[in-house]
Image: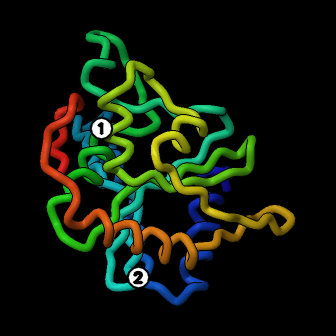
Amino acid sequence: MNEGKQFEKDWKDSVVRTGHFYYRLKDSAQSFGNPEQNGLRFSLKNPFDCFIFANRWLFALELKSTKNSSMNFYRKDFVETGKNQTFMIKEHQIRGLSDTLKFPDIIAGLILNFRSSECTYFWNIKDFLNFSDNTDKKSFNESDIMQNNGYVIHQNKKIKHYTYDVKTFINDNTRVALNWKNSESSGVGRMGFKVF
């Protein structure tokens, strides 16, 4: 199992231990039949990786893990015409998390695991969008996350695998969400995603 998938499994195991509801969206098929023969190729893109239901709140989360010190992200003005580009944080993931903001009692964001420093963060999609709308950087690092309201998720290493303090993460972020609930105004950022 690759390290990114192991991170997702360790995260799921940590959530399940809390007794909260966890649901991982299934990754879709990349093609139907043999695309060389029938020419059919498609890919349905999940809006994010998983849901957690806890403390009467629904968490919509995209999980990312890297061995590098930074992660790049999609923004329309970063796309170079004619160039095949890949972004670690993809357009459909940003859009999927952003779309949840129009509903009450949903906390959406990125769970970001930096393997080299052995640190994991939660970055609320609102704070990520604010950062991405106000930077010319094409990637972010751990310092960027923390300077823009990132949340450190405590973790413990047990030989090869990690456990994450999901209970504290959930409790702290539901408190923050309650404070945000009536204090945010609507607007459209530079990325073109509606921020509610």
Q: Residues within 10 Å of mark 1 (few under 14, many from 20)?
A: some
Dots 2, 1 in contact, CB < 8 A: no
Q: Amino acid at mark 1?
A: Glu
User: Is label 1 in a helix, a strand or a loop?
Assistant: helix
Q: Position of residue 158 (x, y in %)?
A: 82, 69
Q: Amino acid at mark 2?
A: Ala
Q: Which residue is mark 2?
A: 54
User: Is residue 33 shown to the viewer in this render?
Assistant: no
User: Is residue 141 shown to the viewer in this render?
Assistant: yes
In this rendering, would 83 be left or right of 138?
A: left
Q: Nearer the viewer, residue 90 or 18?
A: 18
The residue under the point 62% across, 54% down is 120
Q: Residues within 10 Å of mark 2 (few under 14, many from 20)?
A: some
In this rendering, would 5 be left or right of 84?
A: right
Q: Which residue is mark 1?
A: 91
Q: Position of residue 93 (x, y in %)?
A: 32, 47
Q: Where is residue 21, by image quadrant? A: bottom left
Q: Where is residue 39, by image quadrant? A: top left
Q: Position of residue 104 (x, y in %)?
A: 19, 71
Q: Nearer the viewer, residue 100 or 147?
A: 147
